[in-house]
Amino acid sequence: SLDLMLFISIFALFVISWVVTNKSIIHENFSIPTTRLTAHSSTVLFLISLCALATITALCTLYISIFARMVFTDVQMVMPSTLIDFEALILLFFSLLLAAAGGYFIGSLIYVSKLFIIAFVAVLFIIFRNYIENIQMIIPFYFGEDVFSYVIKALVSAILLFGTAIALKNRKEVRGL
């Protein structure tokens, strides 16, 4: 279903953004000189382009399923749900952006110290132990009002997460050869 596709997209972006903060990927030797600012900027732009690609893919998945249903069942489907819903696309894009920013932030914490893995697992345990209460607290904050307020909250949260991750990774370090 489309909901499963959206969940998989959000989870995949979270994992991909976590993986790009890996030390072996960061210290990969390239033939061009880079600075930390260009490395962070290119990574964030890459994640934003992945969010746009995943949004387009989700839209295509909707139309492929509608087309398949029309071909195999001989049912003509011209309903309001088959038209492009720009609000849903905007919500999906910013949800993906928020997941990518969260994954980049978590990956940056682990890049700084491996002890954050234990902290991350502990936070996940606490969240899932009190699942209902935590979800009832988070969902109304982001989705409680209209689309514009969600976009602003998600954008500010993503900027804060990306900015904090970049600030964490910009600390001075000496890297061996």
Image (cartoon, grey):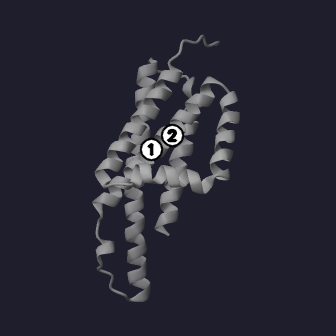
| Residue at 41% in and 47% down | 51
Q: Quadrant of residue 18?
A: top right
The answer to the question of whether label 1 and label 2 lie on touching residues, with beta carbons closer than 8 A, is yes
Q: Is residue 34 visible?
A: no
**150 or 107, which lies in front?**
150
| Residue at 58% in and 53% down | 133
Q: Which residue is mark 1?
A: 98
The residue sitting at the bottom extreme is 74
Q: CA distance from mark 1 to mark 2?
A: 6 Å
Q: Judge the density around disc 2: few (<14), some (14-19), many (≥20) Cα neighbours within 10 Å.
A: many
For numbered disc 1, what is the local secondary structure? helix
Residue 65 coordinates in the image, percent (x, y): 43, 73
Q: On the picture, is 27 further left or further right than 89?
A: right
Relative to 16, does residue 116 appear above or below in the rendering? above
Q: Judge the density around disc 1: few (<14), some (14-19), many (≥20) Cα neighbours within 10 Å.
A: many
Q: Is residue 9 visible?
A: yes
Relative to 174, does residue 10 appear above or below in the rendering? below
Relative to 53, does residue 80 appear above or below in the rendering? below
Q: Which residue is mark 2?
A: 102
